[in-house]
Amino acid sequence: MDAGAPVIAVDGPSGTGKGTVCRRLAQALGWHFLDSGVLYRAVGLAAQRAGVPLNAEQPVAALAANIDLRFVPDPHAEYGMTVLLDGEDISAAIRTEEAGGAASQVAAFPAVRAALLKRQRAFRRRPGLIADGRDMGTVVFPDAALKLFLTASPEERARRRHNQLKEKGIDVSLRALLEDIRARDERDRGRAISPLVPAADARLIDTTAMDVEAVVNEAMRHVREQGLA
Ligand code: DC
């Protein structure tokens, strides 16, 4: 942890191109990258594997505090890194719809979020950190040098997810995805702690009618405007 290292916080729901934009920013600037959703996904998976019910706040939080999680950079991996839980590669297992649902459930618990706070802040190192999540700008790095908040209509986000899954040969109905996105949005926005809302000083980017390239360009414009590149 290096409290002097600058942070760019990128928040918003899934399906906004956030992950891709963050990786591209990290690459362009040569900064470190924190995909905070991975932590919640890993905790959800670890709980399921340990037979800990996802609605049991304290046992899940205890697990979150002690979880042996490692990130190994790998340019060939789909998300640019391999994630190890107790030494086992869980990179694929944490990306399923089910793992996303479990993550959203455990992420609603204050004790779980508190247990993961220090671990997230430890990613802050020079020359800088791109932090991808829901509460990077509001809770984890409130002093971020730049805060971006990406949005897109639920319909467009469902369509993007549908295309992603289709490319992987997974056939899920668009309507089911849309319903799932709406339910998860509601849970993420409505939770009492760290709800998915933009920080007061965040810059909003509505990506509904933009392709990834356009979003990256717009994000880079803000980065330069802020004197970070
Ligand atoms: O970004 P993602 O899809 O990997 O996130 C999975 C879940 O984790 C999502 O439903 C919300 C939760 N999450 C969170 O509450 N706070 C974060 N900083 C990142 C993710």
Image (cartoon, rainbow, N blue to C red):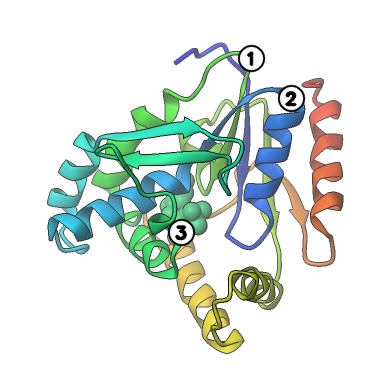
* Nearest to viewer (mark 2 / mark 3): 3
Q: Residue 123 location in percent, x, y?
A: 47, 25
- Identify residue type, mark 1: Pro
On screen, residue 168 versus residue 115, left or right, reads right
On the rendered image, what quadrant is the C terminus found in?
top right
For disc 1, the marked residue is 127
Query: Tag 3: Cα neighbours inside 10 Å, few (<14), some, or many (≥20)?
Result: few
Give the Cα distance between marks 3 and 1: 29 Å
Q: Residue at 59% across / 13% down in the picture?
A: 126
Give the Cα distance between marks 2 and 1: 9 Å
Q: Residue at 44% across / 69% down in the picture?
A: 97
Circle 3 SS class: helix
- Is residue 205 visible in the rendered image? The answer is yes
Query: Tag 1: Cα neighbours inside 10 Å, few (<14), some, or many (≥20)?
Result: some
Give the Cα distance between marks 2 and 3: 26 Å
Q: Residue at 21% across / 60% down in the picture?
A: 48
Q: Are marks 2 and 1 in contact (CB under 8 Å)?
A: yes
Q: Residue at 72% across / 35% down in the picture?
A: 25
Q: Are marks 3 and 1 in contact (CB under 8 Å)?
A: no
For disc 2, the marked residue is 29
Number of marks in the rendered image: 3
User: Is the CB–ligand 1 distance for label 1 below 8 Å?
Assistant: no
On the rendered image, what quadrant is the N terminus found in?
top left
Tell me the quarter of the picture where residue 55 sits. Answer: bottom left
